[in-house]
Image (cartoon, rainbow, N blue to C red):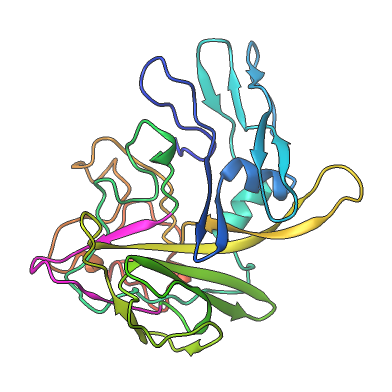
Amino acid sequence: MPKYFMHLPGSGSNPIYWRRRQSFAGIPIHINMNLLSVSLRDSPGTVPPSFRLVPRVGYNVGSGIGNITIQPRVVTDGTNFHELPIGPRLKNFLDYPIGEMNRMNLRPPFYDTTLGVGDSGGGWFRDNNDDSAWHGGFDVARGPDRSLFKVCAAARGTILAISSRDNAPLVLEHKVGRRSFLTIYQHLNLRRTRLRVGQTIGRGEELARISDAPSVPHLHFMVAAQSAIVSRGSPRLAIPAWFAIDAFGVYDFYLRRTNRQTYNYLPDVSPNSWSARIQGAVHPIQWTSQPLSSMM
């Protein structure tokens, strides 16, 4: 079952209903499917007999809204916890984050074809028993030669934010018609970069190499789309917010990672990890050409 709304940590711990928002070069990104569902005005749905919705929980949205109370899409009978199915509006947003007629047309954010997205701690949802389990992106590890590989733009866009230092993020904004989306590149060496906010970057244009900072030799790649969060009280304000979305369409973590029928991440084998099929991928339309398989 997809873990959209809840993560169950180790025995005896409380459920986790989201990960707190993150900031990349000053741009807040929400990693919270409960909040996204509320912003899209999906109702929690039908509560099964003998179950009840878990208590409402406070969340600091920031962005001029501050604290609001959210109803997680989770039910309990006092002992067991279950997620409710995602609503139709959230499903449509996850399938078509920039509109049903629009495509992100992404390319892989690197040149080295031996690279891939590992499923050991680096996928959309990590096998952790804490708040960081909801990863919100994908980690691209170094290849067989262990080199600090070059990172490039996944689509043509404009630099929205950048931190000119080592182990730093860069955020690109991309326009598709009247809609926008972001791509986020974390753990870059930007100490001597000449890139600046407002600069136009072409698809596939080099951004930087990954950082050689200890324990961080990888690219953390994210995609974010926009939805409006409505403030409580008066006046009620609809403030656009960026939400991490999964451009690969995976959204799952399966414990039996060696069984390709039941695990849902890109294989971490090399060479040519990107030519292998993703089990369960549903968003190949977001890529210029399907970089993950010639079979799909």
Residue 167 image point, x, y percent = 32, 65
Name the residue at 23% across, 41% down.
257
To which quarter of the image does residue 139 belong?
A: bottom left
Which residue reaches farthest left?
Answer: 145
268 w.r.t. 165: above or below: above
Segment colored magenta: 137-153
Task: Note whether 293 is above or below 126 in the view shown.
Answer: below
Quadrant location of the N terminus in the rendered image: top left
In the image, is residue 147 part of the stretch drawn in magenta? yes
Q: Is residue 267 left or right of residue 86?
A: left
Query: Which residue: 32% across, 52% down?
Result: 279
Q: Is residue 241 above or below residue 194?
A: above
Q: Position of residue 177 (x, y in %)?
A: 66, 81
Question: Residue at coordinates 69% horizontally, 56% vertically from top-left?
Answer: 63
Is 186 in front, or is 96?
186
Q: Residue furthest right?
A: 234
Q: Nearer the viewer, residue 94 or 33?
A: 33
